[in-house]
Image (cartoon, rainbow, N blue to C red):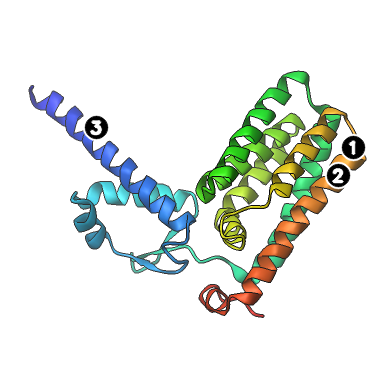
Amino acid sequence: MGDTGDRVLEERRRGSGARMVYDLLRDEILSLALAPGSPIDEVQLAERFGMSRTPIREALVRLSGEGLVQTLPNRSTLVSPIDAMNLGPYFDALVLMYRVTTRLAAEHHRAADLPAIRRHQTAYARAVGAQDALAMIATNAAFHSAIAEAGRNPYFSALFGRLLDEGRRILRLYYDSYHDRLPQRFVDEHEMLIRAVEERDLERADRLAREHGEQIAEQVRTFLARRSDLTVALGVDK
């Protein structure tokens, strides 16, 4: 094949390996199978996946960029802790962005925005029916991001997207509190949000979004209060 062809093939293999490691570690971190604050050993990962440390490092760099792992000054790597001390401020910001983005979508959406919102809602309902927590997290974020984009304020959309990304493991706790059997009424809440947006009912959109966000925050707080093992692991001060 020649030196150039060999290098290209090797880069593709390495890239494929890095993607596989990234996908598996990301799922394990988001599902809390890898606990917040737990160490990550590159050597052990290389042995586990049967590959060199280069694609392992590439996967960890990508996870670091998403805030899911941290590299310490001594070059050791760990799963990023959940900042339990800031859960209150986080939920305050999250509820506010639910309200702002949904209200703006009710005011500024275009007809072309609605099919995408409904597609994401269909995917979310399917994930809820399958009791697939990771799919629920992904489709929920896509649903609310589509609503935010319909509000036509890119600054709010970007901020909300960041909050949803930061809260993926918190949302995993939320679904875990229902043993991944999310009540149908929460799927219905999404439907009510869509109708408020479609009907350009700003006040109803604002109210429903506030209630939607607040019940998530309250459910997570109640769940953590019941789970002493998690409150210790996450450093939550009860």
Whichever of labels 3 and 1 marks the residue nearer the N terminus, that label is: 3
Task: Quote the CA–CA distance across marks 3 and 2.
Answer: 48 Å
Q: Which mark is residue 12?
A: 3
In the rendered view of the protein, which quadrant contains the N terminus?
Answer: top left
Q: Quadrant of residue 140?
A: top right
Task: Quote the CA–CA distance across marks 3 and 1.
Answer: 50 Å
From this view, report whether residue 59 is shown above or below residue 225: above
Q: Position of residue 43 (x, y in %)?
A: 22, 61
Q: Residue furthest left?
A: 2
Say which residue label 1 marks.
202
Secondary structure type for disc 1: helix
- Relative to residue 216, is residue 63 drawn left or right? left
- Relative to residue 31, is residue 42 drawn left or right? left
User: Who's the residue at 72% across and 35% down the image?
Assistant: 147
Label 1 packing within 10 angstroms: few (<14), some (14-19), many (20+):
some
Pick the front one: 102 or 120: 120
- Relative to residue 70, is residue 11 drawn left or right? left
Under mark 1, the amino acid is: Leu
